[in-house]
Amino acid sequence: MRIILLFFLLSYNFLEAQNIEIQLKNLETKLENLRLQQKEVLLAIEDLKMQKVMADLQPMLPTLGVGEELVSHSLMALVYAEDYEQARWVGHIITPDVVNGVVGRTNDFRPDPKIKTGSAVEQDYFIKTLQPDSAYVYDGFGYDRGHLAPSADFRWSEKALSESYYYSNMSPQLAEFNRGIWADLESLLRAYLFRNSTTQLFVFTGPVLKPGLPTIPRAKNKVAIPEQYWKIALDFKNRKAIAFLVPQNTKGYPLTSFATSIDEIEKITGIDFFTGLENTLEETLEKQIDKSTFLTTIASGDVEPLSAVTLPPAHFNSVQARLYMGRNEEIKVCGKVVGARASRKGNILLNLDQQYPNELFTIFINKEQLVNFSYDPLSNWKDKYIVVRGKVNNLGNVPVIYVEKENQLSEFREK
């Protein structure tokens, strides 16, 4: 009897375990189906969002020139300049979705299938050769494949981000430009959305294309190498606008030096932007150079370096000072003291035009030399334009003049 009872209990437990396992599998299957349904819904939401973005972008697109054809992708539109093998302009919108976007770089560079004449290709930027050990050897032509519409602006959509790697959205850029000031500009505009998360930013970007530009000699399609790039941004909701015209060789000048108006970009490129706006509003926005809104460093007190052409003979601005580092030559450097601080050791540091940690030029007064001053340099020179005389040294890759006497410093007065 006990054996029969034990057998019954074992059988019951076995059947119960099987039943629980079946229930678990059923629930796991149900959960997987829900995940698939969620993914389908999220993709549908993303698709509708992209349709809305492109609907918002459409009336803001530039007027098409003779023979030009509009090419539209999921989140960007462009006009391709076949003679130069790159886009004349690319337009897109940075939306608040970028704040929470998590899609990473895809690096799936490829020709744009929508360019009827054929876009640039990989062989326009480098050649890769497969070795016997199945590894590739890359032979670059000296230029980055620089995004016009940056991939990170689309990091809320895997599809749109991938499309940003079409060669129609690439232009040959020097590495120091593409990974330096150009990347800074792209980040600056995304940061605007972090500070203004209820609006969206209309962005148009392009190279300055003109006859006679050099080409990449070894490129398959002889891609032109622009000397300058432009980018314009418009916050239509808040009526804020700015543009930038940046040369590949910035000569060390900060991004603030290249801010301009949409009007100026139109004059240089011949492109007519925002024709869908009411005329008076268009004229008002296209004249704006709203640095304080878009450039947080300007808002916090930084200024542009003085124009080199307006300085007296033998006087240099804070950017030009870098050219004299280590040359053991005494010069005069001019700029505004936007940062004045004492170190923990008691030394005085005055930063011209840009504040720490982005300083362009520093005046350093050792605490032992303060006895040579009849005034307090911190309070006396803060927020004033100044001339400093001395030899330019290198302090952590920042040009610096070490000041020992107060007659090395004087107030700058424009002639």
Image (cartoon, rainbow, N blue to C red):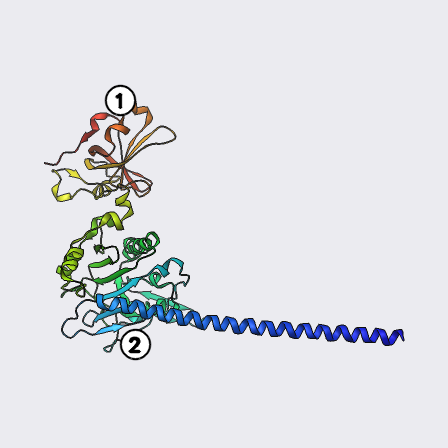
Q: Name the residue under label 1.
A: 372
Q: Position of residue 15 (x, y in %)?
A: 73, 76
Q: Nearer the viewer, residue 197 or 78?
A: 197
Q: Position of residue 178 (x, y in %)?
A: 29, 57
Q: How many labels does the image show?
A: 2
Residue mark closest to the camera, 1 vs 2: 2
How far apart marks 1 and 2 lie (CA) works out to 71 Å
Q: Which of 387 and 224 is in front in this view?
A: 387
**Looking at the image, which residue sits at the far bottom?**
116
- From this view, report whether residue 187 is shown above or below residue 41: above
Residue 98, which numbered label? none
Q: Where is residue 289 in the image (x, y as percent from the top left)?
A: 19, 51
Quadrant of res 182: bottom left
Q: Which amino acid does label 1 sit on?
A: Asn
Q: Mark 2 points at which residue?
A: 113
Q: Where is residue 357 in the image (x, y as percent from the top left)?
A: 33, 42
Whether residue 85 can be seen here: no
**Looking at the image, which residue sits at the far right?**
1
Residue at image location 26% in from the left, 61% down from the top: 202
**Secondary structure under badge 2?**
loop
Quadrant of res 360: top left
Residue at image location 36% in from the left, 70% down from the top: 48
Q: Nearer the viewer, residue 288 or 373?
A: 288
